[in-house]
Amino acid sequence: MQLKPPSSSSSPSILPAWILDLDKRAGRVINQRASHPRVDGALLRLSTAANNGFLWYGVAAGLALTGPRGRRAAVRGLLSLAGSSAFANLVAKPVFGGARPLAADVPLGRQLAKFPASASFPSGHTASAAAFATGVALESPGRGILVAPLAAALAYSRLHVGAHWVSDVTGGAMIGVGVALLGKLVRR
C-alpha cells in the first residue's frame, strides 16, 4: 500500500493557531512586496527546477566531476535528499497536513503553472534542498559553502511563488538538516 499525502484542501493543519496566524501575516508581506519581473521569473524557474529533485541531481553531477571528494559529497548529498524527501512526504505531510496559501493571493507573475495539491507542511522542496546542502557540507565544507546559497534561494522561492508558508519552509529545513546529520551519525 502506497501512502499518499492528503490533499491540502481536506487536511487541516495540527500546527498551533499562533503559527498559522504568523504564516498568514508573513505571506501577506511577501505577496505585497514588489519585485522585478526578472526576479519573479528566476525564482519561479528555480522552484520548478527542483521538482522531483532534478536540480540537485544536476548539482550532484557537477560535484562528481570535481574528483573523489566531490563524488563523496554528491553521494552523501543525494542520500540525505532521499531520506529527507521520504520522511517529509510520507511521514510529516500526512501527520501535519495543512492547506497551502491561496494562489489568488500570489501576484500573477509569480504563480506556478501547476499548483501543488499535497499537504503544505513541511516543504518537501526545502527539506530536499537543506538535506542535500548539509550532506555535501558534511563531506566537503568548501563545496557545501558553494551549494548553501542555492539551497537558501530555493527555500525562499517556495515562499515567493506562494507554494508554502514560512512554517512549512522552516519545518522542511529542519527536517533536511536533521536527516543529513542523522546520516552522518549512522555512517560513523
Image (cartoon, rainbow, N blue to C red):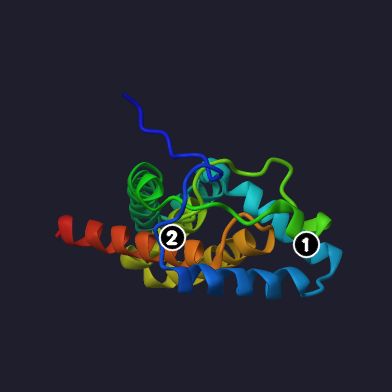
What residue is rendered at 47% in x and 74% in y?
Answer: 18
In the image, 8 versus 82, the foreground residue is 8
Which image quarter holds the C terminus?
Answer: bottom left
Q: Which mark is residue 40?
A: 1
Position of 185 compared to 94: left or right?
left
Label pair 2/1, CB-CB below 8 angstroms:
no
- Horizontal side of 62 relative to 67 (left or right) equals right
Specify the quadrant that holds the N terminus: top left
Calculate the distance from the C-alpha at mark 2 to the C-alpha at mark 1: 22 Å
Q: Position of residue 10 (x, y in %)?
A: 51, 42
Q: Residue furthest right?
A: 37
Q: Regarding mark 2 in the picture, which secondary structure is present there?
A: helix
Q: At x 56% / y 69%, what residue is drawn?
A: 23
Q: Looking at the picture, which amino acid does disc 2 mark?
A: Gly
Query: Under tag 1, what secondary structure?
Result: helix
The image position of residue 69, as x and y in percent, is 35, 59
Residue designated by label 2: 172
* Amino acid residing under circle 1: Asp
